Image (spheres, rainbow, N blue to C red):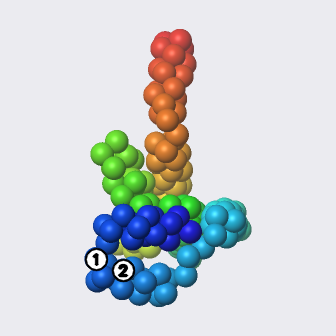
Amino acid sequence: GNSGVAMGVKDWLGLTKEEDKSYFRQFEEAIPSLTYKQRLYGFFICYGAGWVVNFLSAAFLPRINTSTGAAMFAFLYTLGNLISICSSCFLWGPCAQLKAMVACHRLFATLFYFAMMFMTLFCAFYNGPGYTDGARIGAVLGCMFLQFLAMCWYTLSFIPFARTIVKKIVTNCCCGCC
């Protein structure tokens, strides 16, 4: 791939040391490089699998009034979102993905998204005194809705100017209604 070309150029220019080359070769042998086409397949398969798991969570909506139904719904919905996030690791690689997730302009969106995933699961699995099934349903659905909004905001952070445009649209809609 491109990293092999970069190493070749560095070798030609005399910018690499012997130890760098051996470390690079060990790393390259340990983790096989994927072609662009394989990365795209991996991305779309993983992203699609995440959405399939999200849709499977809907099978538990009729039983959301039970603690087991709420737990399975919340677990599958959150798992689907996590699988979808992992799909971009195929395109960028895991380290670049993590760096992008904690970039200054995206950090709040990332933290809020993960906080909503945690809260969705917490509300579904919590069994404290006085925590009724009705309270569980409301909490899980509320957190799931916030998780969805957080996912949208997080996703928009990867599209240049998208969040600015959405803010202006929402502001115009809300100010026009009042």
Q: Going 46% across and 47% down the picture, which residue do you hit?
A: 154
Amino acid at pointer 2: Lys
Rate crowding at label 1 as few (under 14), some (14 to 19) or many (20 or more) other CA atoms within 10 Å. few
The percent position of residue 81, horizontal first and vertical second, equals: 55, 62
Q: Going 49% across and 87% down the picture, which residue do you hit?
A: 29
Secondary structure of residue under mark 1? loop
Amino acid at pointer 1: Lys
The percent position of residue 23, horizontal first and vertical second, equals: 35, 83
Instruction: Work out whether 19 lies above or below 59.
Output: below
Tell which of 115 and 62 is nearer to you: 115
Tell which of 106 and 13 is nearer to you: 13
Q: Quadrant of residue 48?
A: bottom right
Q: Going 46% across and 42% down the picture, which residue do you hit?
A: 157
The percent position of residue 62, horizontal first and vertical second, equals: 69, 65
Q: Name the residue under label 1.
A: 17
| Residue 113 badge | none
User: Circles 1 and 2: CB distance less than 8 Å?
Assistant: yes
Q: Name the residue under label 2.
A: 21
The percent position of residue 131, horizontal first and vertical second, equals: 40, 66
